Amino acid sequence: MDVILRRLRAEDISQVVEIEREAFSPLWASTPFKRELNNRYANYLVACPDAEVVEHPAPPKEIKADSPVSLWARLAKGAGRLVGRAQGDSAPQPLIAGYVSVWYQGESAHITEIAVREHLRGNGIGELLLIGSLTAAVEYGSQVMTLEVRVSNFIAQRLYEKYDFKSVAIRKGYYSDNREDAAVMTTSPIHSDEYQTMFHDLQEAYRTRWREISIQE
Ligand SMILES: CC(C)(COP(=O)(O)OP(=O)(O)OC[C@H]1O[C@@H](n2cnc3c(N)ncnc32)[C@H](O)[C@@H]1OP(=O)(O)O)[C@@H](O)C(=O)NCCC(=O)NCCS
């Protein structure tokens, strides 16, 4: 296993801010992540390399084109880029690949942001973050998961549709940077047998295709 999910920590914040800036419009109001760490009604998860991989990275010379090396080894081509050091950080930290933030609002768990570093997209990390947030929402007792997405953001919509989110409304001019409309997407009840069966099957398919699903503290 090469990528795990865990809760956001204070030392991750500078990297998560970088990912937020890269993923969203420059006019996007930045999330006060430090304050949010203490929000009981929110859940922030990050995807990062398994500690084992950071501590014992494969040396570059062992990486052959046809060998089943980890995502991190392939992308980082050695130990150097398994860690990130954002401006102001005193020590290098494990490279954060992406994050998801969820607010628990009444019966609904609402994804406020989900993003993956641009050069790591297309490796199943966004899907892993969505699986993690759905799992946490089921544990929290939320009935459904909801979100807003730009009507032009087909990639994110494909991801949500895969997990059976359906577009239920349009918020006109929702995004302040370009007045773009948002599609409101929501799941059916996530505790229902039907949803759970589908979610279980999707996770099995994920494990077969990508990696084990590991959510740590
Ligand atoms: C949306 C985002 C988080 C997806 O992360 P990712 O790690 O690249 O996605 P994954 O590799 O896990 O792909 C999961 C699914 O997303 C969809 N997807 C991903 N890349 C896609 C692409 N280039 N074209 C179409 N669908 C795509 C597919 O449904 C895919 O499942 P599949 O491989 O079975 O077809 C990422 O593109 C991102 O950070 N975008 C910028 C921020 C953003 O738009 N966030 C959403 C705000 S609502």
Image (tube, helix red, strand yellow):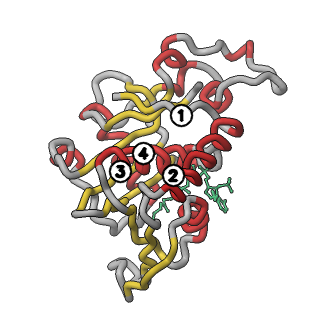
Give the SS element for disc 1: loop
Residue hosting label 4: 135
Q: Residues within 10 Å of mark 4 (few under 14, many from 20)?
A: some
Q: Residue 44: x, y in percent? A: 32, 45
Please, what is the three-letter code of the amino acid marked with disc 3? Ala
Q: CA distance from mark 4 to mark 1?
A: 11 Å
Q: Residues within 10 Å of mark 1 (few under 14, many from 20)?
A: some
Residue hosting label 3: 137
Tell me if label 1 and label 2 are in contact, CB under 8 Å. no
Q: Residues within 10 Å of mark 3 (few under 14, many from 20)?
A: many
Q: Earlier in the sequence, mark 1 or mark 2?
A: 2
Which residue is painted at 45% across and 78% down in the image? 183
Q: CA distance from mark 1 to mark 2?
A: 16 Å
Corner quadrant of residue 203: top right
Tell me if label 1 and label 3 are in contact, CB under 8 Å. no
Q: Earlier in the sequence, mark 2 or mark 4?
A: 4
In the image, taking residue 54 as reference, residue 29 lies left or right, namely left
Residue hosting label 1: 213
In the image, taking residue 63 as reference, residue 196 lies left or right, namely left
Give the SS element for disc 4: helix
Q: Nearer the viewer, mark 4 or mark 1?
A: 4
| Rendered view: 87 above or below 179 | above
